[in-house]
Image (tube, rainbow, N blue to C red):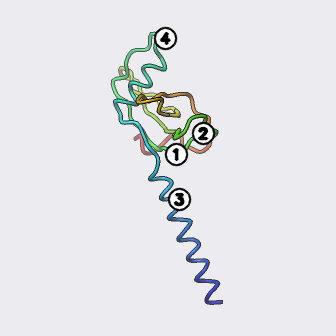
Amino acid sequence: MKHGLLRGVAAAALLGSMVAAQAQSLVLPSIPEATDAIVEMFSGTGMPRPSKVKLGTCIAAVEATHPGQVACTVAVTLGAGISENQMDFYKQGKRWKVQPSVSQDKLPFPDPKLN
């Protein structure tokens, strides 16, 4: 009984450290890189450059199509308005790209990290 309990505790500790290691291994864009990626995605639409971009919760992207793709909640400030969205970021060469996310069910909305 004692050995089974110790194995269970050890397994839980190992699983916890694996989850923490996975979370720490996410590579995220800087705020200027995220802003540039968003501007590029909306180029040609007439959308002005955001005055502020803030990343909230980020996870490994669901159904990732690019290596290292991460899904994040993002607050984009345009003028006096703030829009909260979920976006996937990935690197293409040295530049960050962004696309709409399919990870909405895994990300908080509204995200308390953005307030």
How far is mark 4 from mark 3, CA to CA?
Answer: 40 Å
Amino acid at pointer 1: Ile
For the N terminus, the quadrant is bottom right
Seen from the viewer's position, the closer of residues 89 and 68 is: 68
Rendered residue at 48%/17% (across/down): 42
Cα separation, mark 2 vs mark 4, equals: 25 Å
Residue indicated by mark 1: 59
Return the disc, 4 or 3, that comes first in the chain's sequence. 3
* Viewer-nearest residue: 58 or 95: 95
Mark carried by residue 45: 4
Q: Give coordinates of residue 18: x percent, y percent.
A: 53, 61
Q: Amino acid at mark 3?
A: Val
**Circle 3 SS class:** helix
Q: Earlier in the sequence, mark 2 or mark 1?
A: 1
Label 1 and label 4: CA atoms lie apart by 28 Å
Q: Are marks 2 and 3 in contact (CB under 8 Å)?
A: no
- 9 w.r.t. 106: above or below: below
Disc 2 is placed on an element classified as loop
Q: Within 10 angstroms of label 4, few (less than 14), some, or many (20 or more) residues?
A: few
Question: Which residue, given by chain and number where applicable, does mark 3 sit on?
Answer: 19
Task: Determine whether label 2 and label 1 are within 8 Å by CB.
Answer: yes
Q: Earlier in the sequence, mark 1 or mark 4?
A: 4
Query: What's the distance in space between the residues labelled 2 and 3, CA to CA?
Result: 18 Å
Label 4: element kind: loop
Mark 4 vs mark 3: in front: 3
Q: Residue at x 47, y 33 (%)?
A: 91
Q: What separation in Å lies between label 3 and label 1 (alpha carbons)?
A: 11 Å
Mark with earlier residue (2, 4): 4
Q: Which residue is mark 2?
A: 103
Disc 2 from disc 1: Cα separation: 9 Å
- Mark 4: amino acid: Thr
Instruction: From the viewer's side, name the closer residue of 4 and 65.
Output: 65
